[in-house]
Amino acid sequence: MADKILKKLNIKVWRQNNAADKGRFETYTIDNISGGSSFLEMLDILNNKLILEDKDPIAFDHDCREGICGTCSLFINGRAHGPDEDITTCQLHMRKFKEGETITIEPWRAASFPVIKDLVVDRTAFEKILQAGGFISVRTGGVPDANSIPIPYEDVEESMDAASCIGCGACVAACKNSSAMLFVAAKVSHLGKLPQGRVEAKQRARSMVSKMDELGFGGCTNTRACEVECPKNISITHIARLNREYLTARLSE
């Protein structure tokens, strides 16, 4: 069965020249979009239209377009990554929208993610948090040595689930406090659940949480909005582990 053709859509998109610019919404009309097109393909078509009209194309981030890199981060009709479950924006298809609908597109709204231009935000704050402790620096031996360490199956599975975090920032965008707790917790869990990462577990939690606070991210709201909007289904149980690791680190100071 062929995908439907959306004969007319109204695209209400946030336009902003830079972080200092006040910004504004602008609305464009686009015709004859296949329901099988991805959301980013629709934006490509819209940008081609704007270029032909001698207008400035809409700036938006993208890379792999396979749900892996996490750069295609958009707030669509009030939801991070749009009206579908367990997907990134590049995996969202136009069949999720209705004929004549007005689609509102915004960048992530968080002080720690300043707008670079239009829908592109600066997410280097995540990189700074990783630089603060999201790594293993102790000697763990060569690959054969590491592979010979027995690890419970449940720990491996939980570590790999946490490692699936792609750092897209949907958790921050969905949280009313713009908290990065789910992102930090995933990084703490995926290293801390393995023997190689346990050595620096306390230091890692303390350093990453301190950097998160320094960069202006808010505290956890416990509303689970981050978990709901996470395209990789990262559980908030990792936040509970992060809190335990952090409190243990502080008590041992």
Image (cartoon, rainbow, N blue to C red):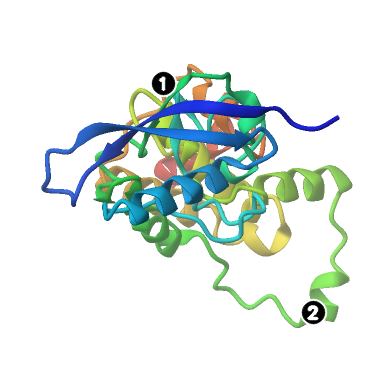
| Residue on which disc 2 sits | 143
| Residue type pointed to by label 2 | Val
Residue located 42% across and 64% down the image: 131
| Residue on which disc 1 sits | 221
Residue nearer the viewer, 196 or 124: 124
Q: Which percent across, then down, holds residue 31?
A: 50, 34
Q: Is residue 119 left or right of residue 157?
A: left
Toward which corner of the image does residue 7 lie, by quadrant?
top right
- Number of numbered tags placed on the structure image: 2
Residue located 35% across and 45% down the image: 119
Residue located 61% across and 54% down the image: 65
Residue nearer the viewer, 239 or 98: 98
How would you rate the neighbour count of disc 1 (Cα within 10 Å): few for under 14, some for 14-19, many for 20 or more?
some
Residue nearer the viewer, 118 or 177: 118
1 vs 2, front mark = 1
| Residue type pointed to by label 1 | Thr
Q: How far apart in space, not on screen, are marks 1 and 2 (Cα)?
A: 40 Å
Q: Which percent across, then down, holds residue 124?
A: 35, 58
Answer above or below: position of 95 versus 33: above
